[in-house]
Image (spheres, rainbow, N blue to C red):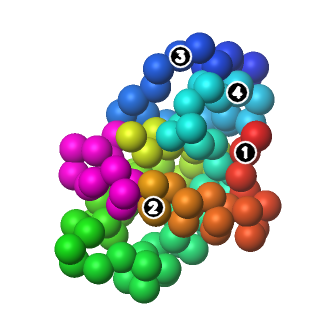
Amino acid sequence: MKDVDFSNAALSDITFSDECDLSTCKLPHDEFVVGFSRWPKVLQAVEARIPFMFNPDDGKVLELVKVDVAQGESQQWYIVNFRDFSKFLSLNVIERLKELFIEEAKKIGALAT
């Protein structure tokens, strides 16, 4: 997917597979859509911190991340629309989850721009 321009697109329920290279894609202008490189490392870091950042009242955050997001774990590049979690989590929890992903991605230089 070289040079694909998603800047005016509305992406939801996104899934990428087969080592799809998203490194040159332009992301939508949407604060809930975030691109990542080094995706398996980001997932690993986030999954390790979820038990310490969320409690049972927040919902099944870890299970959702493992099922809904980790399906692309063979990908090096991934795009997540955190709004897609609204079926299962409150907006407050979604925003905290998004910030956790961004924080961990920044630590390892894996936040796509």
Please report whichever mark, 2 or 3, sits nearer to the chain's N-terminal start.
3
Say which quadrant the N terminus sits in.
top right
Task: Give neighbour class at mark 3: few <14, some 14-19, many 20+ (Cα, 10 Å).
Answer: few
Q: Determine the secondary structure under disc 2.
A: helix
Magenta-drawn stretch, dominant element (helix, strand or loop): helix
Please report whichever mark, 1 or 2, sits nearer to the chain's N-terminal start.
2
Residue 57 among magenta residues: no
Disc 1: which residue: 112
Q: Which stretch is magenta? A: 84-94
Q: Identify which residue, 39 or 53, lies in the foreground.
A: 53
- The residue type indicated by label 3 comes to Ala
Q: Is residue 22 left or right of residue 81?
A: right
Residue appearing at x 39%, y 40% in the figure: 83
Q: Is residue 52 above or below residue 26?
A: below
Q: Determine the secondary structure under disc 1.
A: loop
Cα gap from disc 1 to disc 2, whole angstroms? 17 Å
Residue appearing at x 22%, y 77% in the figure: 56
Q: Identify which residue, 10 or 110, lies in the foreground.
A: 10
Residue 85 among magenta residues: yes
Residue 47 in the image: state x and y as whole percent. 46, 73
Disc 2: which residue: 97
Please report whichever mark, 1 or 4, sits nearer to the chain's N-terminal start.
4
